[in-house]
Image (cartoon, grey):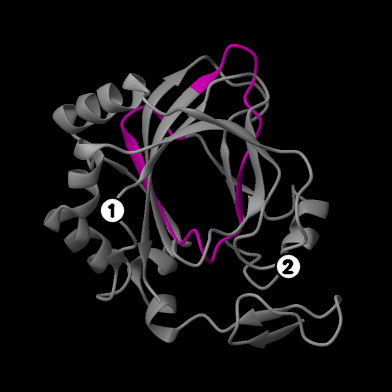
């Protein structure tokens, strides 16, 4: 495998995937030194949590997001297999997304260059048994992901519904990780009101299928760092 400077090309043939160098500033950042992710209590306090949850369940434009046949993207973005519901964020999430204190937090964890990528975040509903998101890295506009758990119902069995990260497999193509999903997996059960900040565009990750009677609602925000 060869390192390069483009997240979306192969080098000559399909067996040689070009993995870019991670910028030194990111490699030296507190977040990367902790494995590329951290789970926080209190980023969403009682008021923020209740307001985000209320906005999410109003559900004005909740849509099905389901893909059975993935594309062949090996590095970043693409169309991984998935099954969940989602909706665009509203006015309150937009304020949370763009708040100066949130940007200060992220710039201290990642790089001083972190900026919001757009006007809105999204709400994701893993509301049915089997809902999941296959291994992937986030799109170019989502170097840093901020995911806050708003609702977490049901008890998981055998890691069902957990976020699965691969901080030790940064240099591998996605197909390799999908073929050996237990190798190097770090599983995180995000509880209600907890927030995970992660280098979603760098660290491969997935959401394992939800179990029977499990459901989860999360707020998802994306930021540029590179």
Quadrant where the C terminus lies? bottom left
Per the rendering, the mark at residue 173 is 2
User: Which mark's residue is nearer the viewer, 1 or 2?
Assistant: 1
- Asked if the magenta segment contains residue 203, the reply would be yes
Crowdedness of circle 1 by 10 Å Cα count: few (<14), some, many (20+)? few
Place residue 54 in its image quadrant: top left
Relative to 59, 172 lies left or right: right
Magenta portion: prevailing SS class: loop
Secondary structure beneath dot 2 equals loop
Q: Which residue is mark 1?
A: 119
Return the x and y of residue 104 as percentages of the image width and height.
17, 62
- Report the span colored magenta: 190-215
Relative to 220, 105 lies left or right: left
- The number of numbered discs placed on residues in the rendered structure image is 2
Is there a contact, CB below 8 Å, between mark 1 and mark 2?
no
Q: Is residue 40 above or below residue 100?
A: above
- Asked if the magenta segment contains residue 158, the reply would be no
Q: Is residue 84 above or below residue 12?
A: above
Q: CA distance from mark 1 to mark 2?
A: 31 Å
Mark closest to the chain's N terminus, 1 or 2: 1
Per the rendering, the mark at residue 15 is none
């Amino acid at each position: 495998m060869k390192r390069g400077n483009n997240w979306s090309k192969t080098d000559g043939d399909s067996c040689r995937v070009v993995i870019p160098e991670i910028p030194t500033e990111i490699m030296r950042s507190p977040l990367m030194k902790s494995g590329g992710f951290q789970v926080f209590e209190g980023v969403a306090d009682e008021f923020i949590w209740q307001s985000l949850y209320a906005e999410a369940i109003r559900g004005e434009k909740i849509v099905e997001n389901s893909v059975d046949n993935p594309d062949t993207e090996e590095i970043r973005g693409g169309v991984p297999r998935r099954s969940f519901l989602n909706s665009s964020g509203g006015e309150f999430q937009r304020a949370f997304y763009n708040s100066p204190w949130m940007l200060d937090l992220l710039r201290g964890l990642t790089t001083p260059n972190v900026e919001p990528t757009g006007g809105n975040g999204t709400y994701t509903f893993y509301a049915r048994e089997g809902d999941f998101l296959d291994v992937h890295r986030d799109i170019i506009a989502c170097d840093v992901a901020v995911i806050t758990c708003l609702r977490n119902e049901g008890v998981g069995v055998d890691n069902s519904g957990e976020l699965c990260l691969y901080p030790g497999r940064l240099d591998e193509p996605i197909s390799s990780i999908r073929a050996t999903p237990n190798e190097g997996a770090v599983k995180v059960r995000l509880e209600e009101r907890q927030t995970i900040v992660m280098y979603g565009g760098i660290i491969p990750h997935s959401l394992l299928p939800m179990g029977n009677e499990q459901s989860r609602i999360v707020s998802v925000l994306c930021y540029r760092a590179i």
